[in-house]
Amino acid sequence: MRPTLGSAGNKTSDLGQAIWEFWTGLWNGTGGSDPADFITDDVTVHLPVFGMPPSASLTTRDDVTRWIEGFRSCYRPGARFAAELGPWLVGEEYVVARWRFTGTWQGGVPATATAPPGTEVSLCGVDILRLEDRRIAEYWLSDDQLDLYGQLGATIPAGARVR
């Protein structure tokens, strides 16, 4: 079921909120909706260079959902993404929000982590979601990946700038 307007009928806030709830439900593992309802078949993804898979490897809805499931598998159930600012619908085409992720790392990525499983982490970032026909067609991620690496005692990826 595609995102619909709430009873208030405020399409700006309702559509942005509905898309955000679908999106974070997928990231939090709590979404009961079919990703086909809110992500287009072909999607364009823009990720930071380090600590992430190549953006070119995530070109379909299935690629994106597998990547998100892989991320979630590194954390205990209950790990959560929540908006700190937003979400906002900009020009009825973009949903933008600053979020915070909190969770208990249980191993996996980053592979160079020296922290023990059970380490609590927190990570902030911004998601920009471009919509087509009320579904996510393009995704930009900006996050504090270096902060996460520090919390987990992981080696900083080659090419990352450290000040």
Image: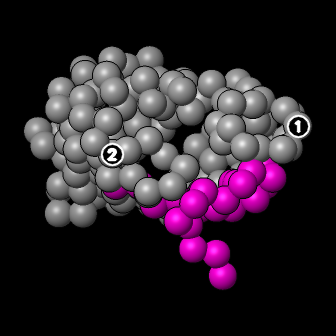
**Mark 2 burial class by Cα count in 10 Å: few <14, some 14-19, many 20+:** some
Residue 43: which quarter of the image? top left
Residue 13: which quarter of the image? bottom left
Q: Is residue 141 magenta?
A: yes
Image quadrant for the N terminus? top left
Residue 57: which quarter of the image? top left
Provide the residue designation for mark 2: 55
* Residue in the image at 39% along x and 26% along y: 65
Q: CA distance from mark 1 to mark 2?
A: 29 Å
Q: Is residue 128 left or right of residue 73?
A: left
Above or below: residue 147 compared with residue 65: below
* Local SS, label 2: helix
* Residue in the image at 70% along x and 24% along y: 77
Above or below: residue 51 compared with residue 36: below
Image quadrant for the C terminus? bottom right
Q: Nearer the viewer, residue 132 or 160?
A: 160
The three-letter amino acid code for the residue at tag 1 is: Pro
Provide the residue designation for mark 1: 116
Residue 49 visible in the current orientation: yes
Above or below: residue 94 compared with residue 18: below
